[in-house]
Structure formats: structure tokens, C-alpha cells
Image (cartoon, rainbow, N blue to C red):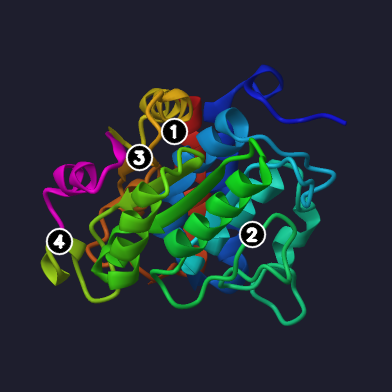
Amino acid sequence: METKTLANAPGIAERAYHIRRNALRMGEVQGQGYIAQALDIADVLAAAYFHAMRYRPENPAWEGRDRFLLSNGHYAIALYAALIEAGIVPEAELETYGFDESRLPMSGMAAYTPGMEMSGGSLGLGLSIAVGRALGLKRKGSDARVYTLFSDGELDEGSVWEAIMSASHFKLDNLIAIVDVNNQQADGPSTQMLAFEPLVDKLKAFGWFVQRVDGNDLDAVVAAFDAAKYHAEPKPRIIVADTLMGKGVSFLERREKNHFIRVEQHEWQLAIKALDSGRQA
């Protein structure tokens, strides 16, 4: 059975393009959604699924797999787009996004979707669950890693900081967290809702190996995953990824409020054309 590694997954930038395009096609089905987040995090997901992680598309429950936990369940459209590109979910299911009986509900549900490792509803729980999974794998003697993505808005939650402290205490060097810092949450800019900077200094003080990168610079993201995987110290690792909401579609990048957006019917094809144009450039 084939295990995905860098050697058989060339063209990470092309993968990121397809993830964005898949997300736009799903968004068009419902006419609205968390599209801006899907566009901003596509590079991180491409680097995770087509460079860093170990998995088998034909067997998403393979025991030796790396686990990817999506804490921010409203980013499910982005993860579905990656799972489709990875061959874990058939592309044909893209047209069912958000409908009754679909395996692709608008918020991530582990019981519904192949490759979805946790259900996302209340925010701030993914890192805590990831700590438990990573500790369990260590105690089983597994060399699998746990990856988890959460958002800067989740830094408002006390459970996140308890998990940050616990991961350091248990020396979970098989845990790689990614926090998407796009400075946007439902009520406004994240930094204005509850200030969390200087984030890198805080995380280092809690005993983590920390890197901060431009989350839309693929080379930087790939290098950060490599550094996180092979860091020698027995401590958990985190990548602080600064991203741009709506990345790749200029008129969505410029929207002042784009946490949850409605895109007019005629704009979907304009968005896809803008994405395609950027790819050709």
C-alpha cells in the first residue's frame, strides 16, 4: 500500500491551487460560507497533506497514519477541499456540500467524513483533544504524529492555554500545532477582541518550539513543517501562520468583513477566474 510522502506528491503549489478551487466550487453550491478562511489556509493544508503527513488515501483509518485534527470546525470546507485533492473523499461528493445526508456538512463531523478525525462545534477544544491523542500514541509506542489546526480567535479560550501547558508538561514532541492568525473572528479583528500578542514569546515561555511564518508563503510553510518534525528537543511544536483572508481572489481579500460571507451568484465564476488567472501568472 502506498503511503503519501514528499517523494510521490510533487507540485505542492498546484495542490494549494486545487484546494482553493475545490473550496470555491463547494461554496458556490450553498452561495455562502467560510470561503475566506478556506482560501487563506490552503497553503498550510497543501504543505501538510502533500509534504509533511503520512497517510493512506484508500484507508483513512490506517493505524500508522498521522492524525490531522481540525479544531475550528467552520474551516471544514477547507479540509474537505484538501481531502478531495488527497483522494480520501471522491471529487463527485463536492456537489453535495452542506446538503442533508451529505458526508460534507458545513461544520466538521468525524462520524460523517472519511479523514475527519474530530467533530468541530465549540471552539477551543481541538488542541486539548490533540494532547490526549498525542499522549495516547506515545504510550502505545507509535511513531505517528498528531497535527492540529486552530484559529487565533480560539486563543480567547482558557482550555487552549491549559492544553498548551499540558503538552509541554508531557513533552509531546509528536504534536505539531498550527494556529491560523488571520486577525478575524465573528465579532471583529481578533487582536481587538482579546489581545494575544506577543504570541511567540508567550508560547516559548510555555515550553514549546515555536516558529512564526507567512502562512501564504509555501516555501516558508514547508520549511516550518520540516523544522517542526525534526526538532531535537522533547517538546511540542507550533507554527504560527500569518495568513490573508480570501488569499488568491483579490476582491475577497479586500472585503472588510469576511468571517462568513455571501458571494453573489455571478461572483463565483469571477472568483474562479481570478484564481485561475493567478495560477497562470
Which-is-in-front pick, marks 1 and 3?
A: 3
Please name the amino acid that badge 3 sits on.
Answer: Ile
Residue density around tag 3, few if under 14, some if 14–19, many if 20 or more, within 10 Å? many
Please name the amino acid that badge 4 sits on.
Answer: Thr
Q: Which residue matches tag 2?
A: 117
Please name the amino acid that badge 2 sits on.
Answer: Glu
Q: For the point 55% across and 56% down, which residue is it?
A: 69
Residue density around tag 2, few if under 14, some if 14–19, many if 20 or more, within 10 Å? many
Which-is-in-front pick, marks 4 and 2?
A: 2
Q: Quadrant of the N terminus?
A: top right
Q: Which residue matches tag 3?
A: 239
Looking at the image, the residue that sits furthest to the bottom is 100
Q: How many discs appear?
A: 4
Secondary structure of the residue carrying numbered label 2: loop
Which-is-in-front pick, marks 4 and 3?
A: 3
Q: Is residue 90 left or right of residue 207?
A: right
At which x and y percent is residue 65?
Answer: 70, 42
Tell me which label, 3 or 2, sits earlier in the chain: 2
Tell me which label, 4 or 1, sits earlier in the chain: 4
Instruction: State how far apart marks 2 and 1 are (Cα).
Output: 32 Å
Q: Which residue matches tag 4?
A: 191
Q: From the viewer's side, name the closer residue of 54 and 23.
A: 54
Which residues lie in the magenta part? Answer: 196-212
Q: Which residue matches tag 1?
A: 278
